[in-house]
Amino acid sequence: MGFRVTIDGAGPVKLSEQCVTSVEFFSEIPKDSNARATDNGTALKIRGKMLFSLGAEAEDATINMAKWSVVPSESADAYRNVKVDVVAANQVVREYTLPNAFVMEYEESLDDETGVGEFYLHVKQKKDLTKLTSIEGGFSE
Amino acid sequence: MSLRVTVNGANSFEVAKDCVQKIKFRTDIPLDSNARTKDVGSTLEITGKILVATDGDPFDSTRQLALWSVVPAEDAAAYRQVEVEIINAGVVERKYSFPRAFVVDYKEDFSNSDGIGQFTIIIKQKKDKLDTIAIEGGYIGA
C-alpha cells in the first residue's frame, strides 16, 4: 500500500510512495456529545521520510512543508489544498481532499547516522468549511 | 549527514559537527484551533555530545550553550541568532535560521562510564517574530 500526497499553493509539494510512510485521517467530534453535533472537524496526520537526493538532483519537496508551517495567519498561503491518495494494487482505496487545510503541527527530525530525515505533518480543514472535505475511493487509478 | 549549529550575537560560537547528533525542528499551534491562528511557535531541539578535549582544546563550545541558558531575561544577550545547517554529501539540505531565539530548556548528562557528556537544548523563536524564521535548502555548499 502506498501513499501520494499533493499540496497546492505557493511552493507545491508532491510526495510519492517512496517517502510517505503513514497517513491517518480523523473525523473529530466532541466525545461528550449526546447527539450528533455540528462541532466536527477533519484532520490528517502524515508521516514520512525526507529523502535527500545526492548532488541535489531531484528537488526536495519537504522543504515547502517546513516553509508552509511558519506562514503567518494573515497570509492567504496559510490555507492550502491537501490531497492524499491511498493506493493498493492499482486501486485508489481512498482519496482524501482537504481544500482549506492549515498546519497544526509540523516536525522534522534529523540525525548524523541515518542519512535521511523524518517529518510529521498534522493538518486540519478550516472548521467552518468541514463540509468541503471530500472522501473518495474504490476506483482504479 | 552532518549537522552544524552556529549561534551569533553576544559571544558568537559554533557547536562542532562532531558534537551535534540530532536536530528536531517543530512548528506548533494549539491543537484545539479551528483555523490558523497567530498563536504559532517554532522550536528547535538539538542533542549532542559534550566531547572532552584531552589535549587541552581551548574552546569548549558546548559550555557556551550552558552559559547562554542562564542569561537573565533582562539581558539583551538572552536573544541570539541561531543557524542550523544539515549537510549531506556536499549539499546543504536544510538551513534553519532563528534570528530571535531564546533558550527554554537546557540539560547536560554525565555518567562515570561514558567519557563524554550529552547535552539537550531546546530553543524557541520569540513568538511575535515568527515571520523572520528562514528555512532554506537544496543548494551545493559545505
Image (tube, coloured by chain):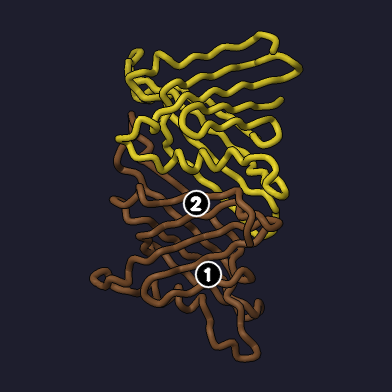
Residue bearing the label numbered 2: B25
Task: Please state which of residues B70 and B42 is positioned toward the viewer in this rendering.
Answer: B42
Callout 1: helix, strand or loop? strand
Q: Residue A53 at what x, y percent from top left?
A: 70, 45
Q: Colour of chain B?
A: brown
Report in which chain the residue with disc 2 lies: B
Task: Please state which of residues B73 and B58 is positioned toward the viewer in this rendering.
Answer: B58
* Numbered mark located on residue B103 in the image: none
Left or right side of B44 for B17: right
Looking at the rendered structure, the kind of residue marked 1 is Phe
Q: Residues within 10 Å of mark 2 (few under 14, many from 20)?
A: many
Look at the image and tell me in which quarter the C terminus of chain B lies: bottom right
- Residue plotted at (53% across, 55% down): B95
The vertical placement of A95 against B117, above or below, is above
Q: Which quadrant of the view contains residue A20?
A: top right
Measure how far apart labels 1 and 2 are at the Cα level: 17 Å
Q: Which quadrant of the view contains residue A74?
A: top left
Q: Colour of chain A?
A: yellow
Task: Work out whether mark 1 precedes mark 2 in sequence or the reverse, and give the earlier one.
Answer: 2
Q: Which quadrant of the view contains residue A33?
A: top left
Residue bearing the label numbered 1: B119
Q: Residue A28 at what x, y percent from top left?
A: 42, 24
The vertical placement of B10 against A29, above or below, is below
Task: Please state which of residues B72 and A54 is positioned toward the viewer in this rendering.
Answer: A54
